[in-house]
Structure formats: C-alpha cells, structure tokens
Amino acid sequence: MTQPILQHLCQVIYDSQVGTAIRESDYAFSIIESVHVLAITLLVGTISLLDLRMLGVVLREVPVTRLSRAVFPLTWAGFGVMVSSGLLLFWAEAAKNYVNPAFRVKLILLLLVGLNPLIFHTSVYRRVSEWELEHRSPWRARAAAIASLTLWSCVVIAGRAIAYF
C-alpha cells in the first residue's frame, strides 16, 4: 500500500537537513519552543485583554477601538513570531505530528480561532461606533469574546498535549 502524499511530505520535511538540525541540536528545539510559548503569551494576552473588555470585565471606561489600536501591533507581532516558530517546531517533528491526534485537534482549533475574528470583524465590529462606549458590549460581541477565550484556551491545551501523544 502506498503512503499517503501528506504523510510522505511530512516524512520528507522531517528528514530534511533543517528538521534534523533542529531536532538533534542541544539547544535549538528548546529555544524555538520557548520563543513559541512567549509569542503565544503575547498573542493570547492581547486578544484576551480585548475580549475581557468586550465582556465588561476590565477597562470598561476605555473605548473598544482605542484598546484595539493599542494592542493590535503587539497582537500581530505575537502572531508572526508564533507562526514562524511553530513552523520551525513542525519542521523538526513533522512525521511525528502527522500521526499525533493532539496536533490534529490543534490545527482544527487554529482554523476555528481564525474564523472567529473574521466573522466578528465583518459583522458586529462594523458597527462598533454604536456600542464601543458601553460598559457591556452587544451579545454578539460578547459571544465572539467568549468563543475567542474558549478557543484560545483549547489551542494552548491541545498544543501542550502534543508532547504526551
């Protein structure tokens, strides 16, 4: 039976010089993983701050757009470093991750956590000027915030679970 194309591609990535170098280095994988965790902290921390504001838990006097403008540069920086370091981690363990159920769950959760702001920004956020000064955001904004906090928590849990499968 032939090996599925995706599995074969993951094996090729795993066997590459870069993947092998990261995996066999005394420090590379650990450093990249630490950078990945710090980037996730920056990303999820800034997103959580905005989510908690929309839920009316913190910074209720700060307009949502003002807070968004303040945190988005940090959010995007965290995202960029998280994706870059995540790709390097995947490169080092692609063949293992292909069969890892926690990794597959994490990918699905990342897709969902990416759809949430897309839906939010193309719907309820378009009318933010109508509600951003309210201490409590409209129910659709609160639902998006709850979904965001829940999905990001699950991404972190699934990411941590990769080591145990």
Image (cartoon, grey):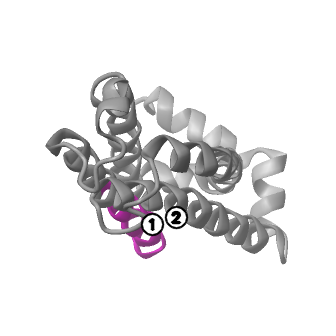
SS under mark 2: helix
Please rate how many residues cluster around mark 2, counting C-alpha atoms within 10 Å: few if below 14, some from 14 to 19, many from 20: some
Residue mark closest to the camera, 1 vs 2: 2
**Rendered view: 15 above or below 37:** above
Q: Main structural element of the magenta stretch: helix, strand or loop?
A: helix
Q: Residue placed at 42% from the left, 55% from the top?
A: 103
Q: Amino acid at mark 1?
A: Ile
Left or right position of 96 against 35: left
Q: Whole-percent x and y of residue 49?
A: 46, 61
Q: Which residue bears the numbered disc 1?
A: 162
Q: What segment is highlighted magenta in the picture?
A: 151-165
SS under mark 1: helix
Q: Whole-percent x and y of residue 80?
A: 68, 44
* Label 1 or label 2, whichever comes before in sequence order: 2
Please rate how many residues cluster around mark 1, counting C-alpha atoms within 10 Å: few if below 14, some from 14 to 19, many from 20: some
Q: Residue placed at 58% from the left, 33% from the top?
A: 9
Q: Which residue bears the numbered disc 2?
A: 45
Left or right position of 123 against 43: left
Question: Considering the image in quadrants, where does the N terminus appear?
Answer: top left
Would you say residue 75 is visible in this rendering? no
How far apart are the two marked residues, 1 and 2, measured between alpha carbons?
A: 22 Å
